[in-house]
Amino acid sequence: MSPPLSQQLTKLEGYIELRLFTEATAILESLQESVRATPPVLSLEIALCIAEQRYNRGLFLAHTLCEKSPNLHIGFIHGAYCLHELGRTDEALAYLQAGPESLQKEPTYFYNLACYQATLGNREMAISWLRQAIQLDQNFHSLALKDPDLRSIRDSL
């Protein structure tokens, strides 16, 4: 008998954080297809794809998650991130902004907008978005100091 799903998901999340991708993949593959298609499992599989830099697969799964659960923020955040990592930053910006209005309560939303705007060379807009992220969560200030995407606006922090 296999362990309860919540226990498997906790292990899966831990394996991803520890970068034990083979173990994480084994857990995913042990789940029934109907379970793998649920939002919690999709979210973790997208996180695994991002950790493994499999951005095309992550984007596909993010689209699926957004279709199934359009009010879940993580599908839009991860989908936009995959697009950005694929060099499609204009699309990433549009994808993120197409999310639900409630996404605008998430500091990650504003932080990622700042990254995408900075990448596109829109310095003032990037600074504005980053300030909103930091206002919502001060931890984004130290993160921004290390983020290569925000190199061009560090002097404004």
Image (cartoon, rainbow, N blue to C red):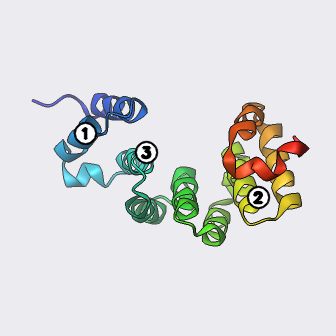
Whether residue 95 is visible: yes
Q: Residue 11 appears in which quarter of the rendering?
A: top left
Specify which label sits upstream in the sequence, 1 or 3.
Answer: 1
The three-letter code of the residue at mark 2 reads Ala
Dots 1, 2 in contact, CB < 8 A: no
Q: CA distance from mark 2 to mark 3?
A: 23 Å
Nearer to us in this view, 106 or 149: 149
- For disc 3, the neighbor class at 10 Å (few under 14, some 14 to 19, many from 20) is some
SS class of the residue under badge 2? Answer: helix
Dots 1, 3 in contact, CB < 8 A: no
Which residue, given by chain and number where applicable, does mark 3 sit on?
51
Q: CA distance from mark 1 to mark 3?
A: 12 Å
The three-letter code of the residue at mark 3 reads Ala
Picture disc at residue 22: 1
Residue under the point 26% across and 49% down: 35
- For disc 1, the neighbor class at 10 Å (few under 14, some 14 to 19, many from 20) is few
Give the left or right position of residue 61, taking residue 157 as reference. Answer: left
Residue that lies at the very extreme toward the left in this rendered image: 1
SS class of the residue under badge 1? Answer: helix
Which residue, given by chain and number where applicable, does mark 2 sit on?
118
